[in-house]
Image (cartoon, grey):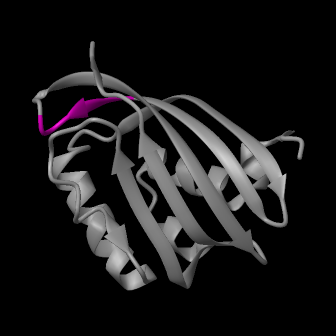
Amino acid sequence: MQMTPARPEATAIGQILAKFVAGDPSLFELMSDDIDFRIDHFRDALDTSWQKAKSREALMAVIGRLGREVFPKGTEALGIDSYALGDGWHLTLFNQRFFYGERQRDVTSLTFIVSHETDGLLDFFRETVTNIVDV
């Protein structure tokens, strides 16, 4: 298997991340009704068990809570790099800077996202937060 660079704006995940950064709620229009969504954190003591959803409706509640607790001032994309893995699968590296509500300070974070899309709709999302670094 070979990873092929993909233009983020040409993928559902890239479009969703751009809308997330912009605070645009229309990002949900790019997700299937039965999206399988989860965020995992590497070596983080916080309870993140609520950061998962099995439907678009449930995901709207998760994103709302993320906005209130994690991203109260939004986020800035430092880099979005996507790679096509074939058959609708993508690996996306999302580097961001934001005011982290849990720590009450500015941080950067690099995450790896494995996603799948069918007919332009995101139906699978697994994000691994590798680090959260104080700025």
Q: As rendered, which of 23 and 96 lies closer to the eye?
A: 96
In the rendered view of the protein, which quadrant contains the C terminus?
A: top left
Within the magenta stretch, is there residue 41?
no
Range shown magenta: 97-102
Point out the residue furthest to the top here: 135
Is most of the magenta stretch helix, strand or loop?
A: strand
**120 up-or-down from 58: above or below:** above
Q: As rendered, which of 99 and 53 lies closer to the eye?
A: 53
Residue 18 visible: no
Within the magenta stretch, is there residue 98?
yes
Q: Position of residue 96 (x, y in %)?
A: 44, 30
Q: Where is residue 25 in the image (x, y as percent from the top left)?
A: 43, 65
Residue 80: image quadrant is: top right
Q: Which residue is drawn at 73% across and 48% down?
A: 9
Q: As rendered, which of 35 and 74 lies closer to the eye?
A: 35
Q: Which residue is drawn at 20% across and 44% down?
A: 72
Q: Position of residue 53 (x, y in %)?
A: 37, 75
